[in-house]
Image (spheres, helix red, strand yellow):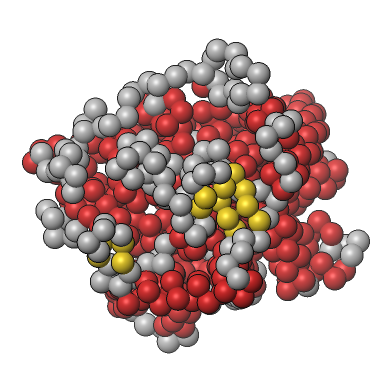
């Protein structure tokens, strides 16, 4: 397989899905109109409801949905099953399900005064559905936040060349919000200033890096300053780990890559003899940094921080994708080689490794292609997070209804290109997990795409920085939605939860406790299943709403049934794997076992909640099916 074919497949799928399917649904089923007043205009409060330019909103929504999912998911799936099944699911998923989920969730929220999916389900399905959906969404978001915060803190702790760019991102986000909405500056000029400054900061992080005579990496001035900061914090308790955990996947960024002898070296954060990852105090320092960043995004007015930060992140990601895509085309045509002398344009992974249908040995995880592929690769094909952030965030900023299709469907198809890049990156870089393989592959592609003008080491640093930026800009929105959900869920019973600061702090405290019960990879396993269940439930709400409005629900109904059944089975398989490999494993003890049991309990809770919601949804669908079908309101009504 050559990288150039991935570019061709990606371009063809995006063109066909958008122009020959999405446009038809928008015209014939949703009937969007620029004459209807949107919630952003009707309820403009300058905090959550705020009309935004289609161009800004596209960047905001793209960065709101593009997080670790389209990177970690395809990389993990390619390592388990091969790149062939992963590519096929990405193509089929985004074409028939993914864009429809994102777009329809936004449009249904717009047609219901910008209400959340929970509030819509209360009116549309049943009051208890709203309460149960609140429980599902909150615990789902806690899994999501735990997975993202865990991996981000590990990267910031392990990569001293990354934090400076992230700090500058926060400052440039504040500046961009001020320039766009207070000083009314030209959008092109604002974009040029803040994006160039952020990229420059990302480049300064690895500046001066080199290897000494023994091949050891020596940091440049900025990286060395971060190393000194980490060392000072670790000295507070004599460099003793707060806790140590084993990562059976070796995907934790703190685990070093094997050397020339195939063995992993022992570092301050990793013991090669025991395969234990040490959680040092500097890890907690970067967790606090992430919580402060996310606190700003969750509580400041949307225009002040969250939206401009995501807008900057969108351009960073777009530049990374474009340069990498050029490299995917140039590499096989020129035969360029990487620093190790290997051809960049050829895949190193096999197309099909294992379909996983053989029954596992005792104590081993079971990874059958169905249903596990469909929850391992979430974002890039379909994702429940997209529906959540689209309904409570993007829908409240939509200036015109007709912007819903390019913003919702267009962003999802754009994220699909990021997933293809991730799949390509790991396929040419070889076996490996997480942000490390993504960054390594991106470094090679950018080197090829710039004809060697950007060295591989800088391309890799840009890949790492882009990965952190992708995840961090979404994490702030996870906590924003989390505090809104907690306030709506508990606010009537316990009024203090209506206070945004209280609900945010409680959400972050629960996330901190969850992260410290196990490595992020355990959280990721359960997040994938719960994320796709959330997608199925959002499609259920859309399906019932379409039926109640007398519109054809087929484009949401059939994907909903497939995802609902698939993810129920996947959640059971994931809970089973957690039990046999960790909870009941005599080699495991302490926090990993406690974390595994916590994930199993959450899995059971989510299963029960989704079954009840599914039953209520079925009854509501039957109720609306029995009534005479109302004709859709004409455009402009």
- Which of the 4 image quarters holds residue 577? top right
- Which of the 4 image quarters holds residue 59? bottom left
- Which of the 4 image quarters holds residue 193? bottom left
Total numbered circles: 0
Q: Name the residue rendered at 49%, 60% in the picture.
A: 268
Query: Is 101 left or right of 194, judged from the image as shown?
Result: right
Query: Is 523 left or right of 162, judged from the image as shown?
Result: right
Q: Quadrant of the N terminus?
A: top left
Q: Nearer the viewer, residue 221 or 441?
A: 221
Q: Is residue 209 above or below residue 125?
A: below
Q: Is residue 625 above or below residue 330?
A: above
Q: Name the residue rendered at 46%, 52% in the picture.
A: 266
Residue extending furthest right? 493
Query: Is 543 left or right of 613, judged from the image as shown?
Result: left
Q: Nearer the viewer, residue 264 or 524?
A: 264
Q: Name the residue rendered at 62%, 61% in the picture.
A: 241
Q: Nearer the viewer, residue 564 or 224?
A: 224
Picture coordinates of residue 70 (x, y %)? 45, 44
Q: Nearer the viewer, residue 357 or 606?
A: 357
Residue 629 seen in render: no
Residue 439 seen in render: yes
Picture coordinates of residue 143 (x, y %)? 66, 48
Q: Name the residue rendered at 74%, 46% in the picture.
A: 590
Picture coordinates of residue 208 (x, y %)? 25, 71
């Amino acid at each position: 397989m050559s990288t150039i074919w991935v570019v061709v497949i990606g371009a063809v799928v995006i063109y066909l899905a958008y122009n020959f399917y999405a446009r038809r649904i928008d015209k014939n089923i949703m009937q969007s109109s620029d004459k209807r007043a949107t919630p952003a205009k009707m309820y403009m409060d300058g905090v959550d409801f705020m009309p935004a330019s289609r161009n800004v909103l596209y960047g905001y929504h793209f960065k709101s949905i593009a997080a670790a999912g389209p990177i970690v998911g395809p990389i993990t799936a390619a390592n388990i099953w091969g790149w062939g099944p992963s590519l096929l699911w990405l193509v089929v998923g985004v074409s028939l399900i993914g864009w429809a989920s994102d777009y329809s969730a936004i449009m249904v929220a717009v047609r219901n005064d910008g209400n959340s999916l929970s509030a819509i389900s209360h009116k549309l399905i049943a009051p208890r559905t709203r309460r149960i959906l609140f429980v599902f969404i909150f615990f789902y978001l806690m899994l999501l936040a735990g997975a993202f915060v865990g991996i981000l803190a590990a990267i910031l702790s392990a990569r001293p060349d990354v934090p400076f760019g992230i700090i500058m991102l926060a400052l440039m986000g504040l500046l961009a919000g001020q320039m766009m909405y207070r000083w009314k500056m030209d959008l092109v000029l604002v974009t040029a200033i803040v994006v160039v400054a952020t990229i420059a900061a990302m480049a300064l992080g690895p500046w001066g890096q080199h290897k000494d005579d023994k091949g050891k990496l020596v940091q440049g001035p900025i990286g060395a300053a971060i190393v000194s900061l980490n060392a000072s914090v670790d000295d507070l308790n004599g460099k003793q780990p707060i806790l140590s955990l084993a990562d059976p996947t070796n995907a934790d960024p703190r685990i070093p890559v094997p050397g020339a002898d195939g063995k992993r070296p022992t570092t301050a954060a990793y013991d090669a003899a025991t395969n234990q990852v040490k959680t040092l105090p500097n890890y907690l320092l970067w967790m606090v940094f992430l919580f402060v960043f996310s606190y700003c995004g969750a509580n400041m007015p949307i225009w002040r921080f969250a939206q401009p930060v995501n807008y900057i992140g969108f351009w960073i990601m777009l530049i990374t994708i474009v340069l990498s895509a050029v490299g995917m085309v140039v590499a096989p045509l020129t035969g360029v080689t990487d620093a190790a002398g290997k051809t960049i344009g050829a895949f190193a992974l096999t197309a099909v490794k294992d379909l996983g249908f053989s029954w596992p040995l005792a104590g081993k995880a079971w990874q059958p292609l169905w249903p596990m592929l469909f929850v391992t690769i979430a974002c890039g094909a379909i994702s429940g997070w997209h529906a959540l952030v689209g309904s409570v965030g993007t829908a409240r900023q939509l200036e015109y209804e007709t912007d819903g299709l390019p913003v919702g469907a267009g962003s999802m198809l754009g994220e699909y290109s990021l997933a293809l890049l991730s799949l390509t990156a790991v396929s040419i870089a070889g076996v490996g997990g997480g942000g490390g393989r993504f960054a390594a592959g991106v470094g090679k592609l950018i080197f090829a795409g710039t004809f060697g003008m950007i060295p591989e080491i800088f391309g890799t640093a840009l890949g790492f920085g882009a990965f952190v930026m992708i995840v961090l800009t979404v994490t702030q929105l996870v906590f924003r939605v989390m505090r809104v959900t907690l306030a709506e869920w508990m606010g009537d019973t316990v009024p203090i939860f209506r206070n945004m600061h209280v609900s945010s702090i409680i959400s972050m405290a629960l996330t901190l406790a969850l992260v410290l019960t196990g490595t992020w990879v355990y959280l990721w396993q359960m997040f994938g299943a719960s994320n796709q269940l959330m997608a199925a439930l959002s499609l259920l709400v859309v399906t019932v709403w379409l039926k109640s409005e007398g519109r054809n629900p087929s484009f949401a109904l059939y994907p909903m049934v497939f995802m609902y059944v698939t993810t129920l089975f996947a959640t059971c398989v994931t809970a089973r794997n957690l039990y046999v490999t960790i909870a009941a494993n005599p080699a495991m003890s302490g926090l990993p076992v406690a974390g595994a049991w916590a994930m199993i309990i959450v899995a059971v809770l989510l299963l029960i909640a989704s079954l009840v919601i599914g039953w209520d949804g079925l009854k509501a669908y039957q109720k609306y099916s029995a009534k005479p079908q109302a004709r859709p309101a004409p455009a402009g009504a």
